């Protein structure tokens, strides 16, 4: 059974940094496009960044130049390094896996809260 478990969220001051981690199990990790999404209070869930097994990345315009997505295929891990955090980055961050072969099968983590506040 597929499972994605996020960690690393918390409270940080504006301008600070956090690193989110997502541990994947129950999937053939190298065949999945991994991503991070977020849902801010009162808003819809939105894409933050995605990364293919080969390392190709896509970022939302709002995080370009501040966030870095990476993955470690042998360890079945995906990371989100968040720098220069802003209050508007406050949200629940979700790890996501989408099968690269059929683009249909996908899985979500339970989410981790990130709060940017002074």
Image: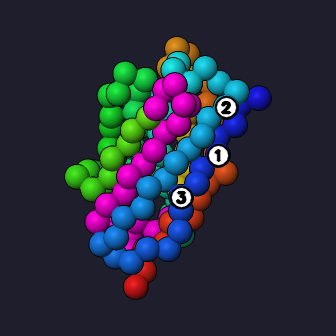
Residue at position x 35%, y 27% from top?
Answer: 55
What is the distance, in whole Å, between disc 3 and disc 1 at their CAs? 10 Å
What is the distance, in whole Å, between disc 1 and disc 2 at their CAs? 9 Å
- Taking the magenta stretch, the answer to whether it contains residue 86 is yes
Q: Residue furthest front?
A: 75
Q: How is the image coloured?
A: rainbow
Residue at position x 50%, y 74% from top?
Answer: 11
Specify whether 77 is left or right of 70.
Answer: right
Q: How many marks?
A: 3
Q: Which mark is residue 15?
A: none
Q: Residue furthest right?
A: 1
Give the mark nearest the N terminus, 3 or 2: 3
- Taking the magenta stretch, the answer to whether it contains residue 84 is yes
Q: Which residue is mark 2?
A: 25
Q: Which residue is mark 3?
A: 8
Q: Which residue is mark 1?
A: 5
Looking at this view, is 93 or 6 the one in front? Answer: 6
Q: Residue furthest left?
A: 65
Circle 2 residues within 10 Å: few <14, some 14–19, many ≥20: some
Which corner quadrant of the image does residue 23 belong to? top right
Classify the position of the C terminus by image quarter.
bottom left
Give the mark nearest the N terminus, 1 or 2: 1
Residue at position x 28%, y 66% from top?
Answer: 84
* 47 to 93, vertically: above or below: above
Residue span colored magenta? 72-91
Helix, strand or loop at label 2? It is strand
Circle 3 residues within 10 Å: few <14, some 14–19, many ≥20: some
Callout 1–callout 2 Cβ contact below 8 Å: yes
Q: Residue furthest bottom?
A: 118
Specify whether 6 is left or right of 14.
Answer: right
Where residue 38 appears, as percent x and y from the top left, is 50, 55
């Amino acid at each position: 059974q597929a499972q994605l478990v996020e960690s690393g969220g918390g409270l940080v001051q504006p301008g600070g940094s956090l690193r989110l981690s997502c541990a994947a199990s129950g999937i053939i990790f190298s065949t999945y496009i991994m991503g991070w999404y977020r849902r801010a209070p009162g808003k819809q869930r939105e894409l933050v960044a995605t990364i293919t097994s080969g390392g190709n990345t896509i970022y939302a315009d709002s995080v370009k130049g501040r966030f870095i997505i990476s993955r470690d295929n042998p360890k079945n891990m995906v990371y989100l390094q968040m720098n220069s955090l802003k209050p508007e980055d406050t949200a629940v961050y979700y790890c996501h896996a989408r099968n690269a072969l059929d683009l249909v099968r996908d899985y979500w983590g339970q989410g981790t809260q990130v709060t940017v506040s002074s």
